[in-house]
Amino acid sequence: MDPIPKSGLYYPNKIARITILSLEEVMGKNGLNAILNLANLSHLIDNYPPDNLERQFDFSDFSSVIGALEEMYGPRGGRGLALRCGRVTFADALRHFGSLAGVGDLAFKVLPQQAKLRISMNAMAKIFSQTSDQLSTVEEKEDHLIYTIHRCPVCWGRKTDKPACYIATGLLQEALKWVSGGDEFRVTQTTAHSTGDPTCDFVIQKEPIG
């Protein structure tokens, strides 16, 4: 796989570490090591980023890992693994993060469902915007929310035929499921940097599936 030039934009080590541990959980140790080798990141094998909030993990390295996943397993296989990894990333760790920690409080639990969705998605955007160079915003429409990633580490420096930030989609799906107490919501990525768009946009339907 061709190396992606460094971006000078960073995730905190902690979020990179959480993602790599989630990939290990989904794919196993050998699967993860093969991905890291293919992504030209063999120095990370058995040497994961430290568990701190220092902004030191370049977006290009994050994108390389996701690109290697697709290259190794094909678009369809890579998509399934990335969605699962996104879900595990949220379920295992991100729900304990900063602004989302209060979402388990009783005062939050008694709010109407749509208010919960709006507040939790804004909290998620705030976490990424405050801890990393991934600027995220949320816009509310009548029947859906638009979650926008303005600088996306998932597809940084890559070209794809269609939007393919599946790890981000899985993360949002699992967050919505957790916030709603078990409902699944349709999350559709409509634009992507990797297809030439200025932002990566995810449309979240306010009504749960089924």
Image: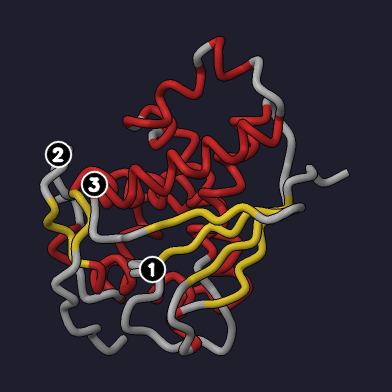
Q: Quadrant of residue 30?
A: bottom left
**Does 55 appear above or below 151?**
above
Query: Nearer the N terminus, badge 3 or badge 1?
Result: 3
Residue plotted at (44% across, 70% down): 69
Q: Nearer the viewer, residue 54 or 79?
A: 54
| Helix, strand or loop status at disc 3 | helix
Q: Residues within 10 Å of mark 3 (few under 14, many from 20)?
A: some
| Helix, strand or loop status at disc 1 | loop
**Does 16 appear above or below 53?**
below
In this figure, which residue is indicated by the disc labeled 1?
150
Which kind of residue does numbered mark 1 sit on?
His
Q: Which mark is residue 52?
A: 2
Q: CA distance from mark 2 to mark 1?
A: 24 Å
Q: Residues within 10 Å of mark 2 (few under 14, many from 20)?
A: few
**In this picture, residue 12 sits left or right of residue 38:** left
Residue 191 percent coordinates (x, y): 56, 77
**In this picture, residue 179 sits left or right of residue 134:** right
Q: Are marks 3 and 1 in contact (CB under 8 Å)?
A: no
Residue plotted at (56% across, 89% down): 161
**In this picture, residue 171 sits left or right of residue 76:** left
Q: CA distance from mark 2 to mark 3?
A: 11 Å
In this figure, which residue is indicated by the disc labeled 3?
131
Q: Quadrant of the N terminus?
A: bottom left
